[in-house]
Amino acid sequence: MPLTLLDYTAPQNYITHVFGFHFPINREANQAEAVAYLKARLGQVFSLIPFLGGQIIHAEDGQLPRLVYSREGGSSNLNQFPDEVFDSQVIDLPYPHFPQPFWELLRLGVPAANMTKRLLWLLPESDPAPGDACHPVTLRATFIEGGVLLGFAFHHGVMDGTGTLEFLKCFATGTLERLDEVDNLRQGKEGIIKLAANTAKTAPVNPRSMDGYEFAVPQTQPVLPAAVAKILTISADSARSLKQAALEQIQKTVGPTAFVSVIDVLCGLTWLHLTRVRLKAKRISPSDTTHFATAVDIRRVMVPAIGAGYIGNMWLRALARSTVSALVEDPSLPVTIEQIASAAWHIRRAIVAMTATDPTLRQQHIAVATMATDPNEKSLTWPEVDAAVRRVISRHSTGLDATVGVGFGADVEFEIPGTGGRVKPAWVRRAYVPNEGAMAIMPRQEGAKGDADWEIWLALREEDMDALVRKRELGGYLSRPPA
C-alpha cells in the first residue's frame, strides 16, 4: 500500500493515546488472560488491515518515507518483532510517576504529568533518525492497582486522528465496520496521488509569496523556558451556555444563518485568554498578529468524497489570524462575550475556508506540498515548508497549535477480560510532551454532545499557565483545579 503526499507531509512522530479501564481483580491470572486477548486482537487487526503490519522507513536525503513488509507472505511485524509491537507490564505502587491507584487518579482528574511517554507507550528509545524503521502501530498494556491502561502509539506518517478511530473500532470488535474498507483505503490513496499530480500541473504556486508561510529565518533563535502541560476542565453546562451566548452574538452581527460550534467557542476562549496573558506579560504587542492553527479533516470535501473509514492522512491545517489588539482590545478589562464570539468566528471562518466547495485553497496547499516532496525539485524541501508554517503559527510567542480529538476513541466499547464486559474507557489521555503553545481538545464520550466534561490539554511556560488559570482569566470557567 503506497504512502501519499499527505502521509509524507504529516509529522513523522507518534500519536499517543492511553485508555484507562477499571480492572478490579488484578491477580496474575487475570492479567495473563487480558494480555493474551490483547495480543491476539492486535494480530487480528493486522490480518484485516495488512498494510499496518509493515514498517515505515523515515525519509533520508533525496528520498521519501516508505512502507516495507516482510518477505514472508502474510507475516506482520507482530510476528517478526513481537517485543517491539506489543508488550505488557505491571507497575507496583508507589511508583514515581504513578503514586496513586486507579481510583485515586480519577479523583485527581488523571493529571497530565502522569502520562510519561516512554513508560506507558512502547516507543523507540530515542526519536527516529533518517532511515530508521518504525512500526505503524504499537500497544503496551500497563496494569496498576485497580486498573489497566492501554497505550496505543500510531505513527502519524501512516494515519491521522480519524484513522486512529477506525483502527480502535476494528480492535474493539475484531471486524471491519464496512467490508469495503480496504478498497476504500486504496481508492483514497489513489485519489490523493492523482489530485497531487493534477494540482501540480493546474495550480502553480509560489510558496514564498503565499499567506501561511514565512521563509525568512530569524538571525537568532531565542532560548525558550521549559513548559508544563495541564488538563483544563470545563463542564458541559458551562460550555453550552458559552456557545449559545456566542452564537447569539455572532448571528446578531453577521446574520441569522451564521454558525459556530461549541468546539470553536472553547478554542476561541482559550486563544483569547492566552493572548491576554501574553500581552500582559509584555512579550507581545498590540500590533502583532496572532494565529490559531487547527487540523481539518478533508475526507468529505474530496472529489469524489472519501469515506470516514479511510485510515491514512487526509487533513490540512486551517489558520485563523487576528491582530492582538483586535482580538484582546484592553487586557485590563474583563473579557466580554463579544470578544469570545469574535475569536470563535475567526476560527470557524478558517475551517470553512479550508472545507469550502471551491477547492482553490486546498489545491494551493497541496501544490506547495507536491513541490516540496518532489525529489527532482531542488528549490524547496518539505522541512523548509514545515518550518515556514511553524514560524507563522509561532506557538511559543503569539499563537496556538491545536488538535481536536473529541471523537477519537472515548465512545469505543472494548471487551477486555477483567474489565466487566463491553465497556468504554473511563478516561483518555495523551503523552506528557509539553511543547509550548500546543493544545488539544481531548476525546470525550458522546463527541460534541452529552453531559461529559470538556477537557483541554494545554502546554505553556509555567508563568503563563499560572496566569491563565486565575479566576480573572480562563480559570473562571474551570469546573475543577487544573490536573
Image (tube, helix red, strand yellow):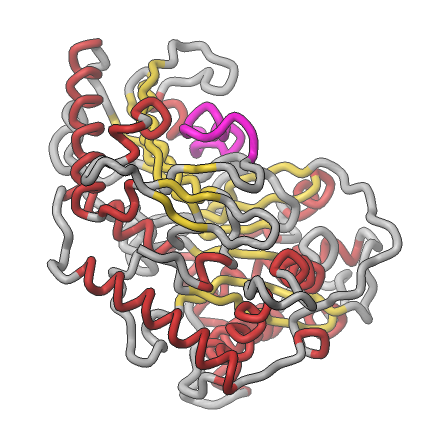
Seen from the viewer's position, the closer of residues 6 and 111 is 6
Whether 123 is among the magenta residues is: yes
View extreme (right): residue: 219
On the rendered structure, is 204 left or right of 45? right
Q: x and y percent of residue 282 in the render?
A: 84, 55
Q: Quadrant of residue 376?
A: bottom right
253 shown above or below 406 = below
Whether the magenta-drawn stretch holds residue 265 is answered as no
Q: Is residue 278 above or below residue 458?
A: below
Residue 180 seen by the camera: yes
**Is residue 412 rendered to the left or right of residue 328?**
left
Q: Position of residue 200 (x, y in %)?
A: 52, 79
Work out whether residue 454 can be spotted.
no
Total marks shown come to 0
The percent position of residue 199, horizontal first and vertical second, equals 48, 80
| Residue in the picture at 34% in, 70% down | 299
Q: Position of residue 354 (x, y in %)?
A: 48, 76
Report the predominant secondary structure element of the magenta stretch: loop
Q: Residue at x 45, y 39 (%)?
A: 430
Residue at horizontal 51 percent and vertical 83 percent from the top: 201
To which quarter of the image does residue 56 belong?
top left
The image quarter containing residue 358 is: bottom left
On-image quarter of the N terminus? bottom left
- Residue that sits furthest to the bottom in the current view: 255
Location of residue 199 with respect to 383 vertically, above or below: below
- Residue numbers of the magenta segment: 107-127
Q: Nearer the viewer, residue 445 or 196?
A: 196
Q: Is residue 284 left or right of residue 16?
A: right
x 53%, y 48%: residue: 59
* Left or right: 433 in relation to 392: left
